[in-house]
Amino acid sequence: MIRAVTRTEKQINMSHRKTPDRSRGNEGWCRRLETGMASTQTHRPSGDPASIMPTPVASIPAKCGLGVFTLVLFNLLSTGDCHIRAGHGPHMDVHPPTLPPPLPPQLDPTHSTDVTALADKTAILNCRVHNIANNTVSWIRHRDIHLLTVGKYTYTSDQRFRALHEDDSDDWVLKINYVQTRDTGMYECQISTTPPLSHFIRLSVVKPYTHILGGPDMYINKGSTINLTCVVEFSPEPPDFIYWNHNNKIISYDSTRGGVTVIIEKGDVTTSSLLIQKAQAYDSGRYNCNPSNAAPANVTVHVLNEHPAAMQHGGQGTYTSSSVRNILTLLALLVGVHTLLQ
């Protein structure tokens, strides 16, 4: 009985020696796997892309458990590039998206044109720039290479100049108050790119010229029609109105005198014609033409009761019939003398 028990114990002891502990065996195998991976990464050349590639997931036995799988997955992600394979197809590298470069600044010449301004008025020079980004726009006067503005700031002691710009606008404006003829010239709109981008605008400052045809004196027969024509030239825009004065009094077109008409034609050259029918002696005097955007002009009208031998109409001489006959007789005499001499 004792010998049987002893034999049974020996059999149990032998079976424990032959059957390995699964948990201890798995732990040892996994340690060997990690050691092999580390040695593989250490002995491969650093220039070889495969030197940073760990053991494929497919070659890890299932007995390593979840811990080894997590370790291998972490090793895959730590290599820097994520390689995605679908079956036997080619692999694809996943990189962050690349944004396109910003568009460069662009000038709009259709809204940045030359300017003609009226003296003593306001001149507006506009420079339209698209895609300005972080760049700035400056205005430079080429007459003396003087920096006038940078962005919204003015860099000149001349208080007539001012920079204007709204945050949501592409327009960069140079405003000149009480512009003078000396301000005529070239102005540069410059963008602070590398190299700088420039656009040139010419400013022309003009003074309108007003005159009355036939002045400064006109002689009119009594009972005829007075025709005064006022001309306004070199104006950037037609005058809003033109009114006439007679001896410092505004002429009323609906007065009891009647027969007074004014005809205005606006354009690059504006004209205003004053017509007074059946002129009388009291219509004589000084007439002024007053445009809204130019200096006035004047003429003196003389209404005569008699027709003189040489009366001026519109600044030109008028000869009587007796004077014409005398001239023709003199010409015939000269032709006869010339014929005799030949």
Image: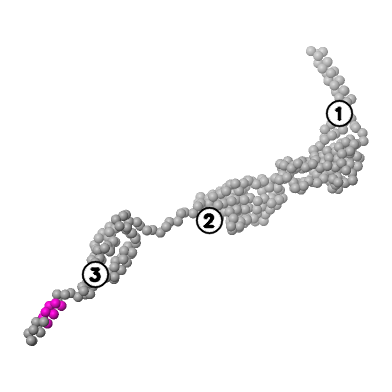
Answer with left or right where residue 335 lies relative to residue 117. Answer: right
- Span highlighted in magenta in the image: 9-16
Q: Which residue is mark 3?
A: 63
Most common secondary structure along the magenta stretch = helix
Toward which corner of the image does residue 269 lie, by quadrant? top right
Residue 14 falls inside the magenta stretch: yes
Q: Give the percent coordinates (x, y) of residue 129.
A: 57, 51
Residue 250 falls inside the magenta stretch: no
Q: How is the image coloured?
A: one colour
Toward which corner of the image does residue 80 lie, by quadrant? bottom left
Q: Residues within 10 Å of mark 2 (few under 14, many from 20)?
A: few
Q: Residues within 10 Å of mark 3 (few under 14, many from 20)?
A: some
Name which residue lies at 51% across and 51% down: 104
Measure the C-alpha gap from mark 1 to mark 3: 135 Å
Measure the C-alpha gap from mark 3 to mark 2: 61 Å
Can residue 216 be seen in the rendering of this structure? no
SS for callout 1: strand
Q: Is residue 123 above or below residue 26?
A: above
Name which residue lies at 65% across and 53% down: 175
Q: Amino acid at mark 3?
A: Lys
Nearest the eye: 268 or 115: 268
Q: Which residue is mark 2?
A: 133
SS for callout 3: helix
Can residue 132 be seen in the rendering of this structure? yes
